Amino acid sequence: MNPDENNELIEEDLSLSEFLVPDTPEIKEIKSIYEKEYEYSDYLSEIEFSIADYYYNANRKVTDKDVIRALKNIKENRDKPISFFEKPLEKEIVKSLVEPLEENLLYDHEFTLVINYVLWSIDNRSWMEGKQAYVKWITYVLGFYSEEEEKKYERKFKKFASKMGVSGAQVDMLLMKKEAENFFDEDDTFGEGSLFEDLALEDILEEDRVADDLETGFFLMTDAEKFDFLLDKGPDYVELVQDYIMELAEKEEFEKIQDFYKKFNEKHENFFPMHFIVGSAYLNSDPAQAISYFEKTLKATENSEEFPPEMLEELKTNMDLLTSLLLEESTEKVEEKASEDRKGEMKQKTRKKASKKKSENKANS
């Protein structure tokens, strides 16, 4: 076995938590690494480079949500060996962190703050167009694009930014062509028609913003915090509820979906989107269950003028599709049973013929 293979095996058995120091009360008091980025640049740069490298060289379809899921999984399972992480992006990020952590140990809490900072950075790009706003931006900033790709990105970025009322100075800052401190000196940063028109400077920089302020920070919450937050404020954040439920469905955590569904309905009676969302979560795993939730949606929206026509159309389409699938499944089962019965009859007849033939042979002998 050569040294590289040996190192690979050693790395696979390592966990990031082996390089993390137990927290002290003082460390736990730190809320964010905002404005302390330089102190943690070794770790931040590795994570950002891994994301950009993976997008540019391995998977051009990776989305911001994919990155968010990867980072959250790494944060929540930092005590697991590297071999635990099966998705390429997760493995690439984890492996990239081993060397800087070996050289400079971090407190466990500091590590979570580093991950949270990247999650916050992704969320900060959510105003930009598309599902790959952050991954494309970080790929541009780190210089992965060719000259032609870079110019194309800049043109598209500036065009969209102008629609959003972002000034030229703001664009330069966002494209890392202007120092951040100069960005906030612009008179039009918070002026009428600007990107941050409705916000004060302290609102932008506040460290403890949560999801009920601009929906920012939701992805930084723990699963328990998300559960409680959406249970309380879900009707105001339907898209977040949908993302949360669908993420649970992807993990096949259907018991948790049922728990949330039951408690949510107790608190927010007749909130029809919940039936529809949960029905959608069961589309692939249990069509019959999905239909039952869609039927509840229809019942809850009878005589309701608030039910969007496009949702009604989608609901009917899904129900028709699922009904046909269930009918096909039922027909297949009937046909399979009939086929098995025919095979059984044929086997029985064959046995009888063989037995008869055997008897005749004995008689002749």
Image (cartoon, rainbow, N blue to C red):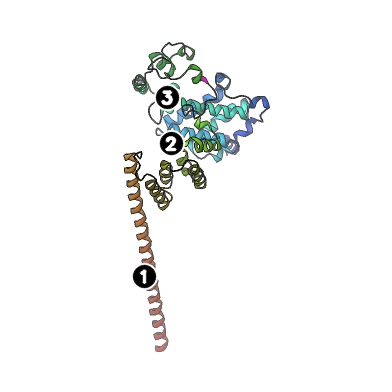
Between marks 2 and 1, how big is the CA–CA gap? Answer: 52 Å
Residue 143 magenta-highlighted: no
Between marks 1 and 3, how big is the CA–CA gap? Answer: 63 Å
Residue 75: x percent and y percent? Answer: 56, 34
Along the polypeptide, which appears first: circle 1 or circle 3? 3
Q: Is residue 117 above or below residue 254?
A: above
Q: Is residue 39 left or right of residue 324?
A: right
Q: Which residue is mark 3?
A: 137
**Number of numbered discs on residues:** 3
Along the polypeptide, which appears first: circle 2 or circle 1? 2
What amino acid type should be assigned to the residue bearing mark 2?
A: Val
Q: Nearer the viewer, residue 259 or 69?
A: 259
Q: Which residue is mark 1?
A: 342
Q: Image quadrant for the C terminus? A: bottom left
Q: Which residue is mark 2?
A: 238
Q: Which residues are magenta?
A: 205-211
Say which quarter of the image contains residue 348: bottom left
Would residue 25 be visible to someone looking at this image? yes
Q: Nearer the viewer, residue 121 or 215?
A: 215
Residue 208 magenta-highlighted: yes
Q: Is residue 93 left or right of residue 192?
A: right
Would residue 365 be visible to someone looking at this image? no
The nearer-to-camera label among 2 and 3 is: 2
C-beta proximity under 8 Å, tags 1 and 3: no
The nearer-to-camera label among 2 and 1 is: 2
- Classify mark 2: residues with Cα within 10 Å, few (<14), some (14-19) or many (20+): some
Q: Is residue 209 left or right of residue 306?
A: right
